[in-house]
Image: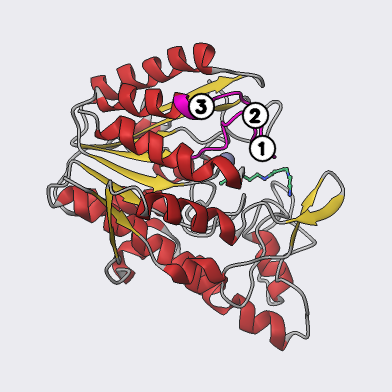
């Protein structure tokens, strides 16, 4: 059985010029060539069947994201031009915590209030790409709901840093959360998310933080040293009816497979205990040793091991693509992970 891979080339049109990094504007790391490299490797592998996603369900999108936030993203580029700005649309002024809630008119101000970093610009084609990625997240969830044991959503832009009403970390819509909500809408009563991107999945955590029906586990670099800084400590375990359904496993810079594997087993153990009907995996290959923006030391072969370890869970799985910035190795790092998952 070939693995269904959902893909839409509209995603390649999102191409921001720069991001703010260590006090400088530098080339944007989340480049179209990333998705192209993954697509080419998977398409040439004989392991997968490329499929177009269905239409993005408006109601489902509104289950995950706030209506005013969706409207902001949809209007941002036109507003930016109307207000006489040039360059990619992004804020340069942000409200601080605890600030009084005031009505905002300028798109600069509205973007600042809805974004937590200076790495998530909006271009002419960003919305189209982000909607395609969201549709792909939904399609991956839907394929699993309809009986696939494994499906892969080749999403770009990524999604796990985007919350209900905010963007950040190269993410606009939360593609993994769309997969989760699609599974729940199709009758699953409990769904788990395993996030293995180098960066903690703060958006997914926030969206499901108080939910007893969605378990969120994330293995990531300690936020004391790395982005997203303000989320991802081990003490964050959920709230209210969702207390105990969030698991954060921060690891230090320099982590290799020997130190990664025990954390992965701990996450798998907790997921098994939760007994979900399905698992959504936020897969980032930025844990790779040569990743240009990250500091773990996993090797290409380790992704097959990671996939095989996760495959020990008997639940059906929808994988969505998150980060991973070493374009030369990215295709192999995705393919081997999928091969490991498909081994069962
Ligand atoms: C989905 C995902 O992996 N998002 C990560 C966002 C990380 N943003 C902060 C990175 C800081 C390093 N910037 C280096 C840019 C090199 N062009
Ligand atoms: Zn990442």
Q: Residues within 10 Å of mark 1 (few under 14, many from 20)?
A: some
Sequence-wise first label, 2 or 3: 2
Q: Is residue 197 left or right of residue 112?
A: left
How many angstroms separate mark 2 from mark 3 (CA)?
A: 12 Å
Q: Is residue 91 magenta?
A: no
Label 1, secondary structure: give it: loop
Image quadrant in which the C terminus is located: top left
- Above/below status of 67 relative to 188: below
Q: Can you identify the residue that label 2 sits on?
A: 223
Q: State which image quarter holds ligand 2.
A: top right
Closer to us: 188 or 132: 132
Q: Which residues are magenta?
A: 284-301
Q: How many marks?
A: 3
Is the residue marked 3 within 8 Å of ligand 2, measured from its CB?
A: no
- Above/below status of 108 relative to 20: below
- Above/below status of 42 relative to 76: above
């Amino acid at each position: 059985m070939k693995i269904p891979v959902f893909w839409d080339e509209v995603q390649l049109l999102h191409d921001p010029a720069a991001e703010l990094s260590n006090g400088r504007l530098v080339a944007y790391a989340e480049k179209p060539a990333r998705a192209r490299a993954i697509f080419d490797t998977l398409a040439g592998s004989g392991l997968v069947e490329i499929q177009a996603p269905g239409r993005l369900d408006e109601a489902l999108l509104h289950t995950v994201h706030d209506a005013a936030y969706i409207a902001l993203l949809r209007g941002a580029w036109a507003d930016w031009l109307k207000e006489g700005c040039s360059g990619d649309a992004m804020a340069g002024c942000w409200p601080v915590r605890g600030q009084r809630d005031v009505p905002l008119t300028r798109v600069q101000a509205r973007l600042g209030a809805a974004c937590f970093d200076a790495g998530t610009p909006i271009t002419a084609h960003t919305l189209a790409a982000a909607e395609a990625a969201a549709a792909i997240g939904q399609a991956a969830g839907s394929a699993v709901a309809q009986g696939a044991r494994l499906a892969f959503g080749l999403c770009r832009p990524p999604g796990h840093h985007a919350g209900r009403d905010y963007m950040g970390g190269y993410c606009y819509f939360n593609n993994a959360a769309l997969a989760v909500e699609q599974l729940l809408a199709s009758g699953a009563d409990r769904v788990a998310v395993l996030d293995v991107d180098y960066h903690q999945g703060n958006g997914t955590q926030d969206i499901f933080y108080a939910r007893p029906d969605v378990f969120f586990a994330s293995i990531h670099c300690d936020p004391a040293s790395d982005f997203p800084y303000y989320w991802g400590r081990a003490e964050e375990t959920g709230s209210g009816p969702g207390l105990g359904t969030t698991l954060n496993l921060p690891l230090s810079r320099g982590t290799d497979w020997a130190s990664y594997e025990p954390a992965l087993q701990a996450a798998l153990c907790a997921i098994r205990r939760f007994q979900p009907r399905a698992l959504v995996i936020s897969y980032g290959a930025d844990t790779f040793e040569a990743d240009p923006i990250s500091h773990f030391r996993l090797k290409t072969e380790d992704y097959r091991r990671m996939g095989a370890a996760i495959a020990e869970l008997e639940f059906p799985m929808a994988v969505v693509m998150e980060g991973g910035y070493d374009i030369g190795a990215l295709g192999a790092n995705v393919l081997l992970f999928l091969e490991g998952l498909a081994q069962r």
